[in-house]
Image (tube, helix red, strand yellow):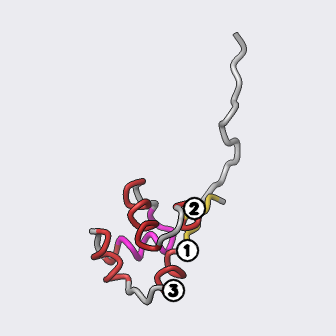
Amino acid sequence: MKKTNIGVNMMTEEFLENTIKVQRAKMNLTQEKLAELVGVTRKTINTIENGKFIPSTMLAIKLARIFRVPVEELFILK
């Protein structure tokens, strides 16, 4: 049987961009208030916004729900 790499991304460098800061501005939310709404610290929101931390799936979904956008609009794989 022949093995293939179907579905495997062969790129060496990928990163996750996000639009959280833009979405927060649209809703006039501070990092502190957003953190409170999703149950994390302000520092967590800050590190996600700055691309230093990738949130769990559950947190990404919570954030998308707050902003009423699809997860794929909030987080973009580059």
Contact, mark 1 vs mark 2 (Cβ under 8 Å): no
Q: Is residue 76 above or below residue 6?
A: below
Q: Quadrant of residue 53?
A: bottom left
Give me the disc on residue 26: 3
Verify whether residue 24 appears in magenta.
Answer: no
Amino acid carrying label 2: it is Leu
Check disc 3: other Cα within 10 Å, few if <14, some if 14-19, many if 20+: few
Check disc 1: other Cα within 10 Å, few if <14, some if 14-19, many if 20+: few
Foreground pick, 70 / 50 = 70
- Identify the residue under disc 1: 19
Q: SS of the residue at dot 3?
A: helix
Foreground pick, 66 / 10 = 66
Residue projecting furthest to the top? 1
Image quarter where the C terminus lies is bottom right
Q: Is residue 37 above or below residue 14?
A: below
- Identify the residue under disc 2: 16
| Residue 39 rendering spot, x and y as whole percentages | 27, 68
Image quarter where the N terminus lies is top right
Q: Provide the residue span drawn in magenta.
A: 44-53
Amino acid carrying label 1: it is Thr
Foreground pick, 56 / 62 = 62
| Residue 3 rendering spot, x and y as whole percentages | 69, 19
CA–CA distance in space, label 1 to label 2: 10 Å
| Residue 65 rendering spot, x and y as whole percentages | 42, 66
